[in-house]
Image (cartoon, helix red, strand yellow):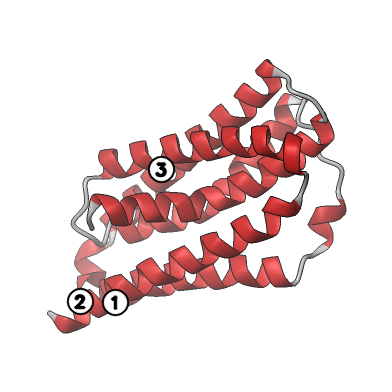
Amino acid sequence: MSLIEILLVAIGLAMDCFAVSVACALVMKRFQWWPMLRLAFMFGLFQALMPCLGWLAGSQFYDYIHRFDHWIAFSILAFLGIRMIWENLHPGQEGHRVIDPYRWHTVLLLAVATSIDALAVGLSFSLLDISLWVAVTIIGVVSFVLSWVALLLSLATGDRLTKRAELLGGLILIAIGLKILLTHLAA
């Protein structure tokens, strides 16, 4: 997997963080350094930690699944991408909950919730020839930066960014999954 592909995966994973950051900024209503920095940092941290956990779990089972690993990676990324697109086109009740980005436990729960997809991506990383540390660093930094940008932009634009961000993230994850599958089938 190339650096560009890792960057695209990182952007796709960060779209949940981006969307939640927009919602949090709408609750905050004005620029506030510490809550905004804490939120972006926690999103970046958990987006970097979860692929490590997924990779660790996946690497334990590599000998059993290496013959069809490309199908697993494709299935995971396609599932996550389709789920993101589905949730974008069919919003559930989550959007109606009040988010309190000033409370530590809320920030922690949001960080875990937005990084579950990264756990599955880490599992697919264990099936690929990839530098885990490079990948998780890129994922963490991209998630932090996009969360911070979302917080700043949403103060100016409102929630118009949320729908597009989730949809784009889903499409990126599906495209990367297809590329992995087609590359292995062509070899």
Q: Quadrant of residue 175?
A: bottom left
Q: Residue furthest front?
A: 156
Residue at horizontal 27 percent and vertical 38 percent from the top: 133
Residue type, label 1: Leu
Residue at the spot of label 1 = 181
Specify the label residue 88 is tagged with. none
How far from the left and from the top, in percent, is residue 182? 26, 79
Kindly identify the amino acid type of the residue bearing the numbered disc 2. Answer: His
Image quadrant for the N terminus? bottom left
Whole-number angstrom distance, CA of label 1 to CA of label 3: 21 Å
Crowd tier of the residue under label 1, counting other residues whose Cα lies within 10 Å: few below 14, some 14–19, many 20 or above: some
Instruction: Give the image quarter of residue 52.
Output: top left
Distance between the alpha carbons at the discs numbered 3 and 2: 24 Å
Q: What kind of element bears circle 3?
A: helix
Q: Are marks 1 and 2 in contact (CB under 8 Å)?
A: yes
Horizontal side of residue 43 vs 66, given as left or right: right
Q: In percent of the image, x 58 and y 32: which residue is there?
A: 148
Q: CA distance from mark 1 to mark 2?
A: 5 Å
Number of other residues with Cα within 10 Å of mark 3, as a class: few under 14, some 14 to 19, many 20 or more: many
Badge number at residue 139: 3
The residue at 87%/42% (across/down) is 98
Reading the image, the residue beneath label 2 is: 184
For marks 1 and 3, the one nearer the N-term is: 3
Q: Amino acid at mark 3?
A: Ile
